[in-house]
Protein backbone atom coordinates (compact mmCIF):
# COMPACT_ATOMS: atom_id res chain seq x y z
CA UNK A 1 0.00 0.00 0.00
CA UNK A 2 1.55 3.29 -1.18
CA UNK A 3 0.70 6.69 0.30
CA UNK A 4 -0.68 9.42 -1.94
CA UNK A 5 2.17 11.78 -2.71
CA UNK A 6 1.97 15.51 -3.36
CA UNK A 7 1.73 16.46 -7.01
CA UNK A 8 4.91 17.47 -8.83
CA UNK A 9 3.83 21.12 -8.77
CA UNK A 10 3.14 21.17 -5.05
CA UNK A 11 6.29 19.15 -4.33
CA UNK A 12 8.24 22.02 -5.92
CA UNK A 13 6.47 24.46 -3.59
CA UNK A 14 7.19 22.17 -0.62
CA UNK A 15 10.87 22.03 -1.63
CA UNK A 16 11.01 25.84 -1.74
CA UNK A 17 9.49 26.01 1.75
CA UNK A 18 11.85 23.41 3.23
CA UNK A 19 15.04 24.43 1.41
CA UNK A 20 18.09 24.38 3.73
CA UNK A 21 16.10 22.89 6.62
CA UNK A 22 18.17 19.75 7.03
CA UNK A 23 18.48 19.23 10.78
CA UNK A 24 15.88 18.90 13.52
CA UNK A 25 15.08 22.36 14.85
CA UNK A 26 15.96 24.15 11.62
CA UNK A 27 13.03 26.44 10.84
CA UNK A 28 11.90 29.53 9.00
CA UNK A 29 8.82 31.67 8.60
CA UNK A 30 7.32 33.03 5.40
CA UNK A 31 5.43 36.19 6.32
CA UNK A 32 5.04 38.43 3.28
CA UNK A 33 2.26 40.44 4.96
CA UNK A 34 3.59 40.97 8.52
CA UNK A 35 1.02 38.72 10.19
CA UNK A 36 3.39 37.50 12.92
CA UNK A 37 3.96 41.06 14.15
CA UNK A 38 0.20 41.80 14.39
CA UNK A 39 -1.31 38.36 15.17
CA UNK A 40 -4.71 39.62 14.15
CA UNK A 41 -6.34 39.45 10.76
CA UNK A 42 -4.80 39.24 7.35
CA UNK A 43 -2.86 36.48 5.66
CA UNK A 44 -1.27 34.07 8.13
CA UNK A 45 2.46 33.38 7.98
CA UNK A 46 3.65 29.89 7.04
CA UNK A 47 5.94 28.36 9.66
CA UNK A 48 8.18 25.52 8.45
CA UNK A 49 10.41 23.29 10.57
CA UNK A 50 12.46 20.13 10.23
CA UNK A 51 11.12 18.20 13.24
CA UNK A 52 13.22 15.05 13.02
CA UNK A 53 13.45 11.86 11.05
CA UNK A 54 10.94 9.10 10.56
CA UNK A 55 11.76 5.54 11.58
CA UNK A 56 13.48 4.89 8.24
CA UNK A 57 15.58 8.06 8.47
CA UNK A 58 13.49 10.13 6.05
CA UNK A 59 13.21 13.79 7.15
CA UNK A 60 9.99 15.00 8.77
CA UNK A 61 8.72 18.54 8.26
CA UNK A 62 5.98 20.51 9.95
CA UNK A 63 4.24 23.24 7.99
CA UNK A 64 1.77 25.33 9.95
CA UNK A 65 -0.31 28.46 10.18
CA UNK A 66 -0.74 29.78 13.72
CA UNK A 67 -2.90 32.41 15.33
CA UNK A 68 -3.25 33.57 18.93
CA UNK A 69 -6.42 32.94 20.90
CA UNK A 70 -6.53 34.08 24.53
CA UNK A 71 -2.71 34.08 24.52
CA UNK A 72 -2.46 30.50 23.25
CA UNK A 73 -0.94 29.55 19.91
CA UNK A 74 -3.56 27.75 17.79
CA UNK A 75 -2.72 25.56 14.78
CA UNK A 76 -4.75 26.38 11.68
CA UNK A 77 -3.62 23.85 10.44
CA UNK A 78 -0.35 22.05 11.16
CA UNK A 79 0.61 19.20 8.87
CA UNK A 80 3.57 16.83 9.10
CA UNK A 81 5.19 15.53 5.93
CA UNK A 82 7.74 12.84 5.09
CA UNK A 83 10.25 13.55 2.34
CA UNK A 84 11.36 10.41 0.53
CA UNK A 85 14.98 10.41 -0.76
CA UNK A 86 13.65 10.00 -4.32
CA UNK A 87 12.04 13.43 -3.96
CA UNK A 88 8.49 12.37 -3.26
CA UNK A 89 6.62 13.97 -0.38
CA UNK A 90 3.55 12.75 1.49
CA UNK A 91 1.59 13.98 4.51
CA UNK A 92 1.27 11.81 7.60
CA UNK A 93 -0.77 13.99 9.97
CA UNK A 94 -3.16 16.91 10.18
CA UNK A 95 -4.02 19.06 13.22
CA UNK A 96 -6.40 21.98 13.62
CA UNK A 97 -6.61 23.32 17.17
CA UNK A 98 -9.86 25.29 16.96
CA UNK A 99 -11.80 22.24 15.75
CA UNK A 100 -10.06 19.82 18.13
CA UNK A 101 -8.83 17.74 15.18
CA UNK A 102 -5.71 15.59 15.29
CA UNK A 103 -5.39 12.88 12.65
CA UNK A 104 -2.47 10.56 11.99
CA UNK A 105 -2.94 8.90 8.64
CA UNK A 106 0.47 7.19 8.42
CA UNK A 107 2.59 5.87 11.28
CA UNK A 108 5.18 3.27 12.12
CA UNK A 109 4.32 0.66 14.74
CA UNK A 110 6.74 -2.18 14.11
CA UNK A 111 5.72 -1.77 10.47
CA UNK A 112 4.25 0.78 8.08
CA UNK A 113 0.59 1.53 8.96
CA UNK A 114 -1.79 3.75 7.03
CA UNK A 115 -5.41 4.85 6.97
CA UNK A 116 -5.54 5.05 3.16
CA UNK A 117 -8.67 7.19 2.68
CA UNK A 118 -7.65 9.66 5.37
CA UNK A 119 -4.10 9.88 3.99
CA UNK A 120 -5.48 10.53 0.49
CA UNK A 121 -7.69 13.29 1.95
CA UNK A 122 -4.64 14.80 3.68
CA UNK A 123 -2.69 14.79 0.39
CA UNK A 124 -5.60 16.36 -1.50
CA UNK A 125 -5.86 19.12 1.11
CA UNK A 126 -2.06 19.62 1.13
CA UNK A 127 -1.95 20.02 -2.65
CA UNK A 128 -4.44 22.89 -2.44
CA UNK A 129 -2.83 24.38 0.67
CA UNK A 130 0.67 24.46 -0.88
CA UNK A 131 -0.70 26.41 -3.87
CA UNK A 132 -2.41 28.85 -1.49
CA UNK A 133 0.79 29.32 0.52
CA UNK A 134 2.74 30.00 -2.69
CA UNK A 135 0.25 32.67 -3.74
CA UNK A 136 -0.19 34.21 -0.27
CA UNK A 137 3.56 34.36 0.47
CA UNK A 138 4.46 35.49 -3.05
CA UNK A 139 6.95 32.65 -3.56
Image (spheres, rainbow, N blue to C red):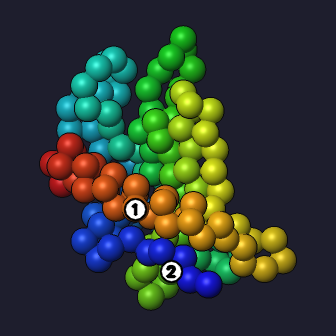
The residue at the point 54 percent across, 11 percent down is 70
Q: Position of residue 56 (x, y in %)?
A: 68, 80
Q: Position of residue 48 (x, y in %)?
A: 43, 51
Residue found farthest to the front: 117
- Nearer the observer, 86 or 96: 96
Image side of residue 128 versus residue 73, left or right: left
Q: Dot 1: within a 10 Å radius of its alpha carbon, few (fewer than 14), some, or many (20 or more) residues?
A: some
Camera-nearest label, 1 or 2: 1
Residue found farthest to the top: 70
Mark found first going from the N terminus, 1 or 2 = 2
The residue at the point 56 percent across, 66 percent down is 117
Residue found farthest to the right: 110
Give the residue pinned by disc 1: 124
Q: Quadrant of residue 111?
A: bottom right
The residue at the point 39 percent across, 48 percent down is 28
Q: Secondary structure at mark 2?
A: loop
Does residue 51 show up?
no
Does residue 43 show up?
yes
Against 50, residue 84 (above or below) is below
Q: Position of residue 99 (x, y in %)?
A: 56, 31
Q: Secondary structure at mark 1?
A: helix
Against 23, residue 131 (above or below) is above
Image side of residue 94 versus residue 12, left or right: right
Give the residue pinned by disc 2: 84
CA gap between label 1 and label 2 equals 18 Å
Residues under numbered marks 1 and 2 in contact, where contact means CB atoms less than 8 Å apart: no
Which mark, residue 93?
Answer: none
Give the quadrant of the N terminus: bottom right
The residue at the point 57 percent across, 20 percent down is 72
Amino acid sequence: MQPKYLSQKTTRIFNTLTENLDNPGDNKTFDAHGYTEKWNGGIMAAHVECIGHWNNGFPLYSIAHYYKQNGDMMKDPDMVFVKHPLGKVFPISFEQSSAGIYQESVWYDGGFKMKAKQQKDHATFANTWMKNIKEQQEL
